[in-house]
Amino acid sequence: MNMINHKQFLIVSSMLSIFFSNVLHASDLKSGYEYLTPATQEMQDDEFANPGMTAVEEGRTEFHRLGVNDKTCATCHGENGSKFNLKKIASYPVYNKEYEKPFTLQEQINFCGEEYLDNVPYVYDCTDLVELEAYVRHLARGEKVNVNITGALKPFYEKGKKLYNKRFGQMNMACAVCHDQFAGQRLRGQVLSQGHSNGFPLYRLGSGKMTSLHGRMEECFRSFRAEPFDRGSDELINLELYLHSRGNGLPIETPAIRY
Ligand code: HEC
Ligand code: HEC
């Protein structure tokens, strides 16, 4: 990622220490897709040209691989995930009663692997887990993100929202400064998007690699010289919850392509 012009941001953020609202209305929601060139949009839409499909295929293999107890994910969720309720996938993170916290898709997948296949749990955001997540989300491609934050998730959503608006690091930056106030503006050759989560895990043209949502957030924290939270931490999970619900109504694009 391009280095951010430090001075430019200090000036801009001090100029804008005014109150701002970060409520996005459905009609104003813009997926990162809308900021891509037509050629890149075409590449994303074409499953044969989309380089992120390699990770989806790896996830498919993993989904059908025998676990320690000789079952597979497909034993319960059907061949090629045919028994999944795609709307349910689009509703993650959901509240998990047993753990009394939000469960991201990665946590659910990891829970299923450990509980129902007797597998050793994965480390959050490791390659296998990101590929399984990419596979599952890809099944729900086109389904609209629909996270319900009215119930037990509400306090976690509020924490995520607070973090999103909190200023961090030497540069005194917040997610909201770049992705709400300056969305659509050009910053050293990059157009800032609204910072939505509907394309993750996604393929990056710059690195030639898949990027998870927590990986992207880590990169953003580093870009404004703040110490990132650990992947899978409560903080990033609350931020993930906030981002998904903030993008409610956007179609799932996994695997999206971004720069
Ligand atoms: C023994 C049956 C079983 C196996 C095997 C299993 N799961 Fe699940 N899975 C479940 C159940 C039951 C739920 C519903 C959890 C809930 O509603 O709290 C679930 C939920 C999910 C969800 C959330 C969407 C939904 O339909 O609720 C995903 C994604 C998922 N599993 C993926 C996987 C993956 C990937 C594997 C293999 C690593 C796997 N599961 C293995 C039983 C299973
Ligand atoms: C200094 C500006 C800046 C700040 C502050 C910032 N980001 Fe970003 N972010 C970027 C840039 C640049 C990109 C890549 C282009 C784009 O999508 O905006 C990006 C991309 C993203 C994306 C991917 C969007 C997509 O469609 O692929 C997400 C999600 C995101 N940021 C979340 C966050 C979160 C959460 C925070 C706060 C922890 C944050 N960002 C803070 C600059 C910033």
Image (cartoon, rainbow, N blue to C red):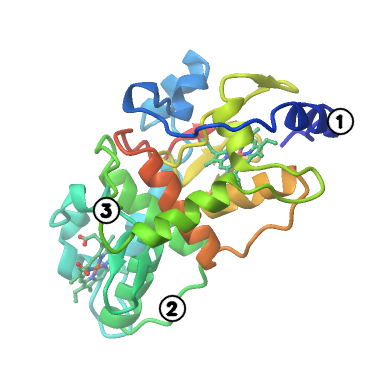
Mark 2 lies within 8 Å of ligand 1 (Cβ measured): no
Mark 1 lies within 8 Å of ligand 2 (Cβ measured): no
Within 10 Å of disc 3 (Cα), the crowding (few <14, some 14-19, many 20+) is few
Quarter-wise, where is residue 15 in the image? Answer: top right
**SS for dot 1:** helix
Relative placement, left or right, of 93 versus 199 is left
Q: Nearer the viewer, mark 3 or mark 1?
A: 3
Is residue 25 visible in this depiction of the protein? yes
Q: Nearer the viewer, mark 2 or mark 1?
A: 1
Give the residue type that dot 3 points to. Thr
Q: Is residue 84 above or below residue 103?
A: above
2 and 1 marks in contact (CB < 8 Å): no
Give the residue type that dot 1 points to. Lys
**Residue 150 marker:** 3
Q: Which residue is mark 1?
A: 7
Q: Which residue is mark 2?
A: 121
Q: Residue at x 13, y 57 (%)?
A: 83
Q: Residue at x 38, y 71 (%)?
A: 110
